[in-house]
Every structure is written in structure tokens, then in C-alpha cells.
Image (cartoon, rainbow, N blue to C red):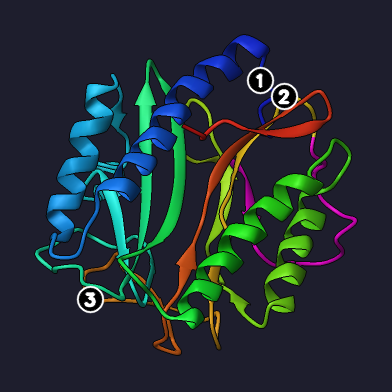
């Protein structure tokens, strides 16, 4: 099918859906406090994004039951909101998708609940800074595999491991489109495969493990953890390549 090249007007439509994601994440980061349940946090996020005129695109996607992926502590992605109460010292991943007039948005953060350890602060910052490093190096002509290698080198340079078998992705008229963008070099030379071009829109999402990147899926069939059982972090933005550089669409 190939990687879509978007016209400026289509990118602006994607910007609308993505800005609502960014605003919802900002709202939750300001609002979430110790003592709330994951279900309450999900309900707050869904109500906020619907008020902005978006549909929660994760709800029902592949059977996912909620609007917000709430990934607590050891859960790195796809955490299902339940009655678990967040407490001081936890770290919480929030991943949100929207749809507005047939165009999709997607972004994620990992946030501290109150004060957290220096170890957890470093873990969160690795995901955030890996994301912004990748955004900085994106340019037309760079291959997606080269971008994956940049992410891998950054993450491993901090002493962490990228999660295996999960990846960033294209986005547009569907929540997940081509290409797949792992956070590590997979299958061959970084000088192979498709090149980044102006007009492409995609999600970069570093997923950070501590000792092992090998994933394990929990009994709920959704929540992903590392086999090492340690805490994890995840950050994501949707970007569009415009005039030779990556522009973040999913900012508030």
C-alpha cells in the first residue's frame, strides 16, 4: 500500500485531532492525584476529549475497552483502566487516541504521581528525551531504519533497553498505518528500506525497559510488561514532515 504523502490541508485536519490529544494529556497531568482510580482517570480523559469535539479512537479498537491506556509502574503499554488506586511514588503511562472527522490523533506520556525516586525520574526522562532526539534528527532522505537505529543508540546509551516487538507507526485516516517504526534496528542494514519524505505523518513512541526488552503480555490479554518485572516508561508524539523537518502535531 505504501506510506501516504499528505497534502497541507490534510495535515491541518490531523493537527486538529492531535491537538486534542495533547490538550487531554496536559489536562490529565495537571489533574491526576494520589487516591484516584485508573477508571476515574480514564473517565476524566474521555469526558475532556469528547468536550473538545473528538471521539476516543482507542475505545473499541481491536476490542480495547477504554478511552485511555493507563499503564501503571511495570506496565509499559496497553494498560486497561480498573479500580486500582494510584498512590504517591507511582509512575503512570497515559496513551490517548482521538478521531475527528475521519482523521486520527495519538500521543502518550509517562507521569509521576507525586514525588518519585531519582531512578524513576531518569527512566521517565529517557523516554521523553529519546522522543525529542528522534524528532530533532528527522529529515527527508533519512531512512526509517536509520531513525530506529538512532532511537536504539539513544536508549541504550542511557543504560536502558527498547521494548521489542512493538513500534511507532504511520497515522492518518486510520489509527495505525504504514510504516512500522521500531525503537531498534530490525532486519538488515540501516541504509535499506523506505526514506522519510515531506508530507509523511507518523508516530514516534520510545518504550523503555530497564534490563530486558523482551515483552510479556499479562492475563488481561492487553497489558504489556518487561520480562524483568521492573518499571517502564513510554512517550509518544505524532509528527508531520513539513519543509524539511518534523513538526509535532500532538502538542496542546
SS type, badge 2: loop
Label 3 crowd bin: few (<14), some (14–19), many (20+), radius 10 Å? few
Residue 177 sits in quarter: top right
Q: Is residue 182 above or below residue 200?
A: below
Residue 187 is a magenta residue = yes
Q: Earlier in the sequence, mark 1 or mark 3?
A: 1
Q: Is residue 122 above or below residue 136?
A: below
What residue is shown at x 83% (from left), y 48% (from top)? 143
Q: Quadrant of residue 151?
A: bottom right
Query: What residue is drawn where x is 48% and y is 62%?
Result: 234
Q: Is residue 216 above or below residue 251?
A: below
Report the span colored magenta: 178-196
Disc 2 designates what residue? 199
Q: Pinpoint residue 215: horizontal percent, then vertical percent.
A: 46, 77
Disc assigned to residue 6:
1
Looking at the rendered image, the quarter that the N terminus falls into is: top right
Majority SS type along the magenta span: loop
Horizontal and vertical percent for residue 133? 73, 54
Earlier sequence position, callout 2 versus callout 3: 2
Callout 3: helix, strand or loop? Answer: loop
Give the Cα distance between marks 2 and 3: 40 Å
Query: Which residue lies under the disc numbered 3?
Result: 219
* Res 41 visible: yes
**Does the CB distance between marks 1 and 2 fall below 8 Å?**
yes
Amino acid at each position: 500500500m505504501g506510506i501516504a504523502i499528505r497534502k497541507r490541508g490534510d495535515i491541518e485536519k490531523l493537527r486538529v485531532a492531535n491537538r486534542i490529544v495533547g490538550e487531554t494529556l496536559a489536562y490529565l497531568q495537571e489533574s491526576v492525584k494520589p487516591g484516584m482510580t485508573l477508571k476515574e482517570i480514564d473517565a476524566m480523559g474521555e469526558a475532556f476529549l469528547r468536550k473538545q469535539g473528538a471521539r476516543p479512537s482507542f475505545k473499541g479498537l481491536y476490542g480495547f475497552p477504554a478511552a485511555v491506556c493507563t499503564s501503571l509502574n511495570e506496565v509499559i503499554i496497553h494498560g486497561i483502566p480498573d479500580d486500582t488506586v494510584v498512590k504517591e511514588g507511582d509512575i503512570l503511562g497515559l496513551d490517548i487516541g482521538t478521531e475527528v472527522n475521519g482523521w486520527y490523533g495519538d500521543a502518550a506520556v509517562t507521569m509521576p504521581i507525586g514525588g518519585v525516586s531519582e531512578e524513576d525520574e531518569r527512566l521517565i526522562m529517557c523516554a521523553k528525551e529519546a522522543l525529542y532526539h528522534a524528532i530533532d534528527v528527522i529529515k527527508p532522505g533519512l531512512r526509517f531504519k536509520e531513525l530506529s537505529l538512532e532511537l536504539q543508540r539513544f536508549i541504550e546509551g542511557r543504560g536502558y533497553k527498547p521494548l521489542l516487538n512493538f513500534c511507532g507507526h504511520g497515522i492518518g485516516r486510520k489509527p495505525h498505518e504504514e510504516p512500522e517504526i521500531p525503537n531498534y534496528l530490525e532486519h538488515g542494514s540501516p541504509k535499506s528500506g523506505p526514506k522519510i519524505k515531506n508530507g509523511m505523518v507518523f508516530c514516534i513512541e520510545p518504550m523503555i525497559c530497564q534490563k530486558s526488552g523482551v515483552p510479556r503480555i499479562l492475563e488481561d490479554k492487553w497489558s504489556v510488561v518487561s520480562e524483568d518485572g521492573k518499571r517502564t516508561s513510554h512517550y509518544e508524539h505524532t509528527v508531520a514532515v513539513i519543509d524539511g523537518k518534523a513538526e509535532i502535531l500532538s502538542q496542546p
